[in-house]
Image (tube, rainbow, N blue to C red):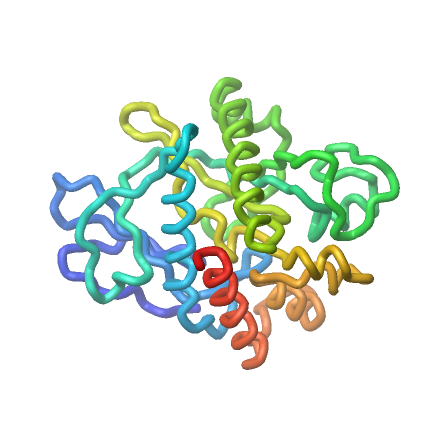
Amino acid sequence: MSTAPLVLPGWRHLYSGKVRDLYSPEDPGDARLLVVASDRVSAYDFSLEPAIPRKGALLTALSRWWFARLAEGPDPVANHLVDGEIPAEVADRSMLARSLDMLPIECVVRGYLTGSGWAEYQASGTVCGIALPAGLQNGDRLPEPLFTPAYKAPMGEHDENITFARVEELVGAERAAQLRDLSLAVYRRAAAIVEERGLILADTKFEFGVDEDGVLRLADEVLTSDSSRYWDAEAWRTGTTPEARMASFDKQIVRDWLSAHWDRQGTPPVLPDEVVAETAARYAELLARLTA
């Protein structure tokens, strides 16, 4: 999608990713960043058309809610948010953040067997190289949540699953253990909150950065419909097929439609109106169910 970034007075556009735009203040003494979530949607590392109406605002609201929840309690999780005025043009879909040294690791946590993990398990009995018990089915809860990191490839390239040993090579053994342990702890904490609302957090991915004082901070988005799989708990318990069990509140609708209509070669097809509308409705329903 080739939509030009907005011109925001007082801010300088740095770059645009698949779904977010990043700005820095024109004041060189201001180290904050403005992270603007667009309505663009991506799947399988491809940007898609058309956009999902109000997606940026819905996912920003969800990230803000989760950042606030995770910062509470006896084990607060430090995050990248800072206070300040956000331009009115993007107030509902932006976050002010401190500048961090972002780590090149996507910290994926899987609590259930699905997606690419299910495909690998069928072929080899493993998920990201981790051996699992025989006899599991699509959508089953895993014996324990798995930390299955990925390397964040440069823009335009695809992320790749990596071993924990490779994470240690990239960021050092101590930092790698910290990423693993914190990711698993945040997943378990979030999964318990989600369960109280009749939902299942099947899997998610976190990104972390280090501030000028060496503090590890949760950054980017967190536990959104783009970075996570959410299922309806009742449908999962009573469903007789994987599709019924996985009544989802994320972009699985988009993935499913693409898988049925595209071989991942060349330019992705345009999403039909009904897929766009249903995805927007699911995003809105998830926010309502979690934050009510």
**Residue 47 in sight here:** no
Task: Check the image and report above or below for 54 versus 248.
Answer: below
Question: Is 9 placed left or right of 280 in the picture?
Answer: left
Residue at image coords 82%, 62%: 240
Question: Is 263 placed left or right of 212 in the picture?
Answer: right
**Name of the residue lying farthest toward the bottom:** 273
Q: Position of residue 261 (x, y in %)?
A: 69, 72
In the foreground, 262 or 193 = 193
Residue at image coords 74%, 63%: 243
Q: Position of residue 162 (x, y in %)?
A: 62, 35
Task: Check the image and report above or below for 158 versus 47.
Answer: above
- The quadrant of the picture occupied by the N terminus is bottom left
Q: How many marks?
A: 0
In the foreground, 242 or 262 = 242
Question: Is 36 placed left or right of 196 in the picture?
Answer: left
Task: Check the image and report above or below for 57 versus 177.
Answer: below
Residue at image coords 72%, 57%: 236
**Residue 276 in sight here:** yes
Question: Is 55 placed left or right of 205 in the picture?
Answer: left
Q: Position of residue 218 (x, y in %)?
A: 41, 38
**Name of the residue lying farthest toward the right:** 135
Residue at image coords 14%, 50%: 26
- The quadrant of the picture occupied by the C terminus is bottom left
Task: Check the image and report above or below for 65 versus 182.
Answer: below
